[in-house]
Amino acid sequence: MPDTSRPPLTEAFPLGDGQSLAHPLWRDRLALLLESTGEGMFGINLAGRCIFINAAGARMLGYEPAEVIGRNMHELIHHTRNDGTPYPEKDCPIFNAFRQGLSCRIDNEVLWRRDGSSFDAEYTSHPVVDNGMVLGAMATLVDITPRKQAADALHRAKEELEVRVDERTRELSDALTQTRKLSAWLDSAREDERTRIAREVHDELGSLLVALKMDVNWLDKRLGEQAERAAPEADAMRERLRCKCQSMGRLIENAVENVGRIITDLRPSILDHQGLWAALEWQAHEFVQSAELKLDWSMDIAPGVDLPEPAAMAVFRIFQEMLSNVGRHAQAGAVDIRIAADGERVTLSVRDDGRGATPDEFESPTAYGVMGMRERARHFGGYVAIDSQPGQGSTFRLVMPVQG
């Protein structure tokens, strides 16, 4: 059945200057294009009135084709800008272009539907020219709303990605800065430790060895004089020699004790001879004895559980740092130590009843001790958690997997 909603192409419609829709130029071009495309198409005369519109164009605008014929297309679909301000016909690119005999393509306009809603549109306009005379124009409409929405979504996604990249870059930069600071602190701490050991060796062992050397020289001198002395004098000298030998013995004992202490500070021999668990227990009792703290101690180790040497050393050093933190900062009166290990993980916690601290203090870029503990644990797949509040003490907790 014929479509009665739109006048046939051969129906006369005034174009201006005596032209009509039956003009061969209009008939030949429009007959081929009007319904062969899914895009919206319409024709206008020099007055800007619609001469024809295909079904796709009318549907895009929310009209029946017959409702559009004869209407001023600018006033019908192009009357208002995107911001709601009026769009004068004199500024319309479509009308200005074809009146000058030019083509135009606009890809950022807004067109209006019958129900008052708008949509983003791309349109092209080509003048219809016969014998050098412009008769009107043909316009093609494309609803680019999906394309615009996709572009907007892509733009938002790009902005979000840029924000995430910036955040990640800042995080990596902060991490790199902290790593550099930690490395510098470790170098400084290593150098300080070397200085401390050198000073102790010089002050403690050096003075003892000098005293021993002086006593040995004294003995050598007195022994050389022994043959020249009379019996009473020789007896007195022997007594003095015995006293000097006893003094030297005490100096030697002090030297041996200091050497042992320095060696223990560098690497406790109990860790090599009796293993990690005995070393932890020894360190805990040594610490509370020197710090004069009460100790609540618990150790539950499953049979046969042990750690490889590097992991065991890491656990021991982390434990030492936890105790050192209690001694330096906590101002505590008691410490609760819990150590447990099974076939999967080692759990170690140190809780004190000291002054505590805010979480920010432990996350500070200068909290090198905390950073060092966490880096050691992370290297072996573990972690260090800290729970602390001002006035409520602190709890340091190490969890590390048991590695074969």
Image (cartoon, helix red, strand yellow):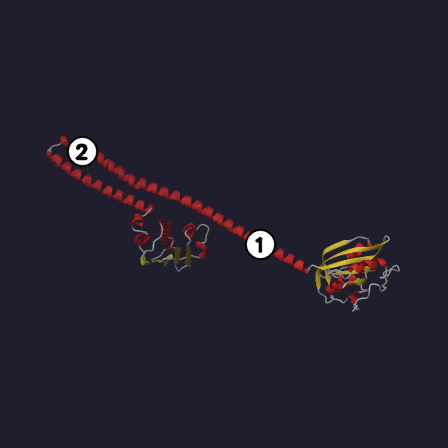
Q: Nearer the viewer, residue 271 or 402?
A: 402
Name the secondary structure under disc 2. helix
Q: Of the residues shown, which amino acid type is indicated by label 1?
A: Leu
| Residue topped by disc 1 | 161
Residue 18: horizontal and vertical position, in percent? 89, 60
Q: Nearer the viewer, residue 341 or 22?
A: 22
Name the secondary structure under disc 1. helix
Residue 263: horizontal and vertical position, in percent? 31, 45
The number of discs equals 2
Give the class, few, some or many, for how many residues have Cα within 10 Å of label 1's Cα (few <14, many ≥20): few
Mark 1 touches mark 2? (CB < 8 Å): no
Q: Which residue is at the far right?
A: 18
Is residue 264 toward the left or the right of residue 6 in the image? left
- The relative height of residue 166 versus residue 83 in the rendered view (above or below) is above
Q: Which residue is at the far left?
A: 231
Q: Of the residues shown, which amino acid type is indicated by label 2?
A: Arg
Residue visible at 15% across and 39% down?
239
| Residue topped by disc 2 | 222
Nearest to the eye among marks 1 and 2: give it. 1
Residue visible at 17% across and 39% down?
242
